[in-house]
């Protein structure tokens, strides 16, 4: 995935569509603990990371044409986990820290990272032979 074209990435479009469907329909129409409690958390990084990395590229903080690197995915997982599950409950009375949210963020990050990096993983390095 080229972050400069994240809005056309089929994985991002699917994740964003599933997030919106759950947020405005499936959570109440279908029900279930997973949809109500952790589905949106699972989709957080697949949906939020590409636009964030696009902004980072525009600011010159990263090469704009690279797919999300595992280090970037991990860093954003850590930052979102601490912000949402540790700091937010200290600031807002309605916020509750839940380790299962952190696991859902991580599972979504792993799936997204695998998807975004699979073309690079398939490439065989070319080694120059000694002449």
Image: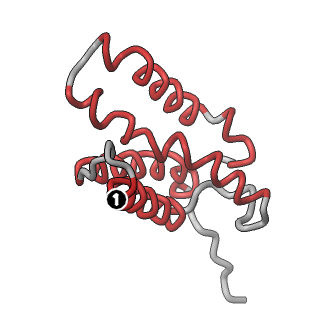
Examine the image and state in which quarter residue 31 appears: top left
Q: Is residue 62 left or right of residue 125?
A: right
| SS for dot 1 | helix
Looking at the picture, does residue 6 appear above or below residue 20?
A: below
Q: Which residue is mark 1?
A: 90
Residue 94 x %, y %: 32, 42
Residue 7 x %, y %: 68, 35
* Residue in the picture at 52% in, 54% down: 122
Residue 110 x %, y %: 39, 52
Looking at the picture, does residue 68 appear above or below residue 12?
A: below
Residue pushed farthest top?
29
* Residue in the picture at 49% in, 32% down: 15
Disc 1 residue crowd, few under 14, some 14–19, many 20+, Cα 10 Å: some
Question: In what quadrant of the picture does the C terminus appear?
Answer: bottom right
* Residue in the picture at 53% in, 40% down: 47
* Residue in the picture at 51% in, 50% down: 118
Residue 69 x %, y %: 56, 62
Q: Nearer the viewer, residue 50 or 1?
A: 50
């Amino acid at each position: 995935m080229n972050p400069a074209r994240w809005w056309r990435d089929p994985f991002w479009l699917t994740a964003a569509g599933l997030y919106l469907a759950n947020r405005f329909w499936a959570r109440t129409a279908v029900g279930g603990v997973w949809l109500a409690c952790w589905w949106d958390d699972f989709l957080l990084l697949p949906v939020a990371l590409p636009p964030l990395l696009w902004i980072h590229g525009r600011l010159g903080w990263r090469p704009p044409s690279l797919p999300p690197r595992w280090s970037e995915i991990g860093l954003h997982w850590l930052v979102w986990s601490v912000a949402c599950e540790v700091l937010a409950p200290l600031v807002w009375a309605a916020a509750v820290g839940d380790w299962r949210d952190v696991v859902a963020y991580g599972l979504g990050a792993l799936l997204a990272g695998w998807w975004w990096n699979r073309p690079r993983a398939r490439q065989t390095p070319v080694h120059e032979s000694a002449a």
